[in-house]
Image (cartoon, helix red, strand yellow):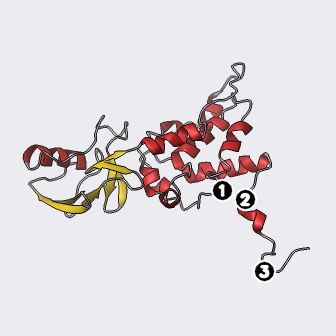
Amino acid sequence: MRVSIKRENKFVDYELEAEDITLLALLNKIKLEIDNTLSFSSGCRSSVCGSCSMRVNEREVLACSYKIAQGDRIEPLKNVEVIRDLVVNMDKSYETNARAKTWLHAFNAEVKLDHSDEKINELQSDCILCGSCYSACPVYAVNGEFLGPFALTRVWKYVSDKRESEPQETIETIQTNGVWDCTLCNECTLVCPQNISSKADIEKLRAKSSQYGYMDPSFGSFSGGFDGSPQF
């Protein structure tokens, strides 16, 4: 088995005996048997903690669940600081949760949830903060202030909660570098190991924003009709 791993801005080839194993198992084998300087992150080994997220052949995966193949090219996540080899610093991405105020602001304890209420944002609660969506996001790649996929998914989780009596406060925080900046390319959904569609959540947040009188700011400079003619 031959694979290439990106280290210090260049790919290093490794060849070893391995068959039908996960990427994480392969990385451990390389570290133990070939090169003990190789650095990578891992935790639960059960696709729950998200710490082993990285890219294979330019696509985000969890190393503990991805089955390695001949010629795979492995590299760290994009759009984050690389600490060493496949280890990255996710602090800046995690900070978006605080900037987006992803929590209940006016919790109404008297409101009770039934099973249908729980289903509304059940999937959003499965986010493991692996950062794959930020790595795949073309907007975050060019705008580091963009709140990004998992922060906006968490916003939807809380503003759709019936116990939140003042959702507008949170909706206001996502109007700049938030819901209107997303291109709806769906790349975040395609790489999410939990099958969460941040694109769908952002679309729902746009609808929610409209209910409170917010709109895409780019419409403000639009002065023509759909055929380009001026409107009076």
Return the x and y of residue 67 as percentages of the image width and height.
25, 52
Return the x and y of residue 144 as percentages of the image width and height.
51, 53
Name which of mark 3 and mark 2 comes first in the sequence.
2
Q: Is mark 2 on a helix, strand or loop?
A: helix
For the N terminus, give its image quadrant.
Answer: bottom left
Disc 2 residue crowd, few under 14, some 14–19, many 20+, Cα 10 Å: few
Determine whether label 2 and label 1 are within 8 Å by CB.
Answer: yes
Residue assigned mark 3: 227
In this rendering, the label closer to the viewer, 2 or 1: 2
Distance in Å between CA atoms under marks 1 and 3: 23 Å
Q: Which residue is drawn at 28% across and 50% down?
A: 86
Please indicate, yes or no, whether residue 62 appears anywhere in the rendered image.
no
Residue 99 in which image quadrant = top right
Label drawn at residue 140 = none
Q: Residue at x 50, y 40 (%)?
A: 95
Name which of mark 2 and mark 1 comes first in the sequence.
1
Residue assigned mark 1: 180
Amino acid type for the residue under numbered disc 3: Asp
Q: Which of 165 and 7 is in front in this view?
A: 7
> Can you say whether 35 is above or below 164 in the image?
below
Distance in Å between CA atoms under marks 3 and 2: 20 Å
Q: Residue at x 52, y 36 (%)?
A: 125
Amino acid type for the residue under numbered disc 2: Pro
Residue assigned mark 2: 217
In this rendering, the label closer to the viewer, 3 or 2: 2
